[in-house]
Amino acid sequence: MEKSNNPSVSRRQFLGTAAALVSGSVLASNSVFGAPAYIKNLFGPNSLINGVQIGVITYSFREMPDQSAEAVLQYVLESGISAIELMGDPAEIYAGKPKSYVDMRSVFPLMRKRNEKQELTEEEKKKLEDAEAQMKSYNAEVAKWRAGASMAKFEELGKTYKKAGVSIYAFKPNAFGRNNSDTEIEFGMRAAKALGANQVTLEHPSNDEHTLKLGTIAQKVGVKVGYHGHEQQTYTLWDTALAQSPANSLNLDFGHFVAAGNPTPLDFIKLKHDRIVSMHLKDRQTPAHGKGNVVWGQGDTPIREALKLMKDNKYSFPATIELEYKVPEGSNPVAEVKKCLEFCKSSLS
């Protein structure tokens, strides 16, 4: 898709191209991946495999140069995925949110290291502190925009993705933290509904008062809240939140759960399956083996067994590919997500 400096022109091109993609009338348009991507996905992708919906969180494409809603859709289509957990920026920027002046692609790895209790160098600490100070100023600007933003563009975007064969089941904007206002929280949940999602996702805040607030607002709006976890995940991490509201749910990260040293991870899925709204898949090692985040099939996470468990028990929540291992030289995130999808297909065949 040819880029334009005029946002309205770019949006019209996006809508027109997506519509033409579905009808099969566009085969030679310029695009991020060129015509072959369109030909391969002429009738839309399908990652519903023997009753198990395989999805992808668009965070997986964070290393790709273009993070626009237009580009993200093409990455998803080229990956062969038909359902997604959408990160906030592509949708919000499409809807008119001011663009950030912080390069989050360089900050995300540092945030992840901190979340996982890894030691940061003094230089990394300074970089993270500076970025967070800039983000505080930017977030105030965003809060003002969210207070008056229309849902029309989110509805438009959700319909466009759906016409291209991609449903949005989860939305993850940076709108649900303890520093976000109730107005922002409700905005994020209403945006999720406008996109067609039935859930919002966020990192578990480890604060009972906040999970009560989020659950209460989610019940009002009519969405679920999926709390994601890293290595703080335990068998009891979600118990208080689940008791507070029927809207509070699990966005279980199966790989991190294993890396945290939890025994019998498959039993945990059985135990909580009725409150899991989505589950992230990655292959991590156990603490005894170094907790590495590795190419699928090389770690200790029983991904195949989890997928078979979902198939055999007809669990309806999606299994979300989250690409976090290092992309091999000569490859790219889209190619690696495709490999993960093939792993899922072979596991469910």
Image: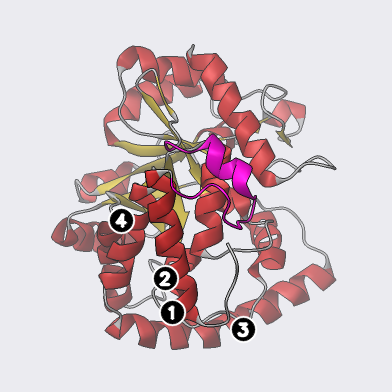
Q: Comparing marks 1 and 3, which lies closer to the viewer?
A: 1
The answer to whether residue 310 is left or right of residue 13 is left
Q: Comparing marks 4 and 2, which lies closer to the viewer?
A: 2
State the SS at label 3.
Answer: helix
Q: Quadrant of residue 16?
A: bottom left
Q: Which mark is residue 133?
A: 3
Check disc 3 and give the amino acid type: Ala
Q: What's the magenta region?
A: 25-44
Q: Earlier in the sequence, mark 1 or mark 3?
A: 1
Residue 3 screen position, x and y as percent: 60, 71
Check disc 1 and give the amino acid type: Ser
> How busy is the neighbourhood of tag 2: few (under 14 within 10 Å), some, or many (20 plus)?
few
Q: Is residue 39 magenta?
A: yes
State the SS at label 4.
Answer: helix
Residue 303 screen position, x and y as percent: 55, 23
Which residue is labeled 1 in the image? Answer: 8
Q: Is residue 46 magenta?
A: no
Q: Earlier in the sequence, mark 3 or mark 4?
A: 3
Q: Earlier in the sequence, mark 2 or mark 3?
A: 2
Mark 1 → mark 3, Cα distance in angstroms = 32 Å
Mark 4 → mark 1, Cα distance in angstroms = 17 Å
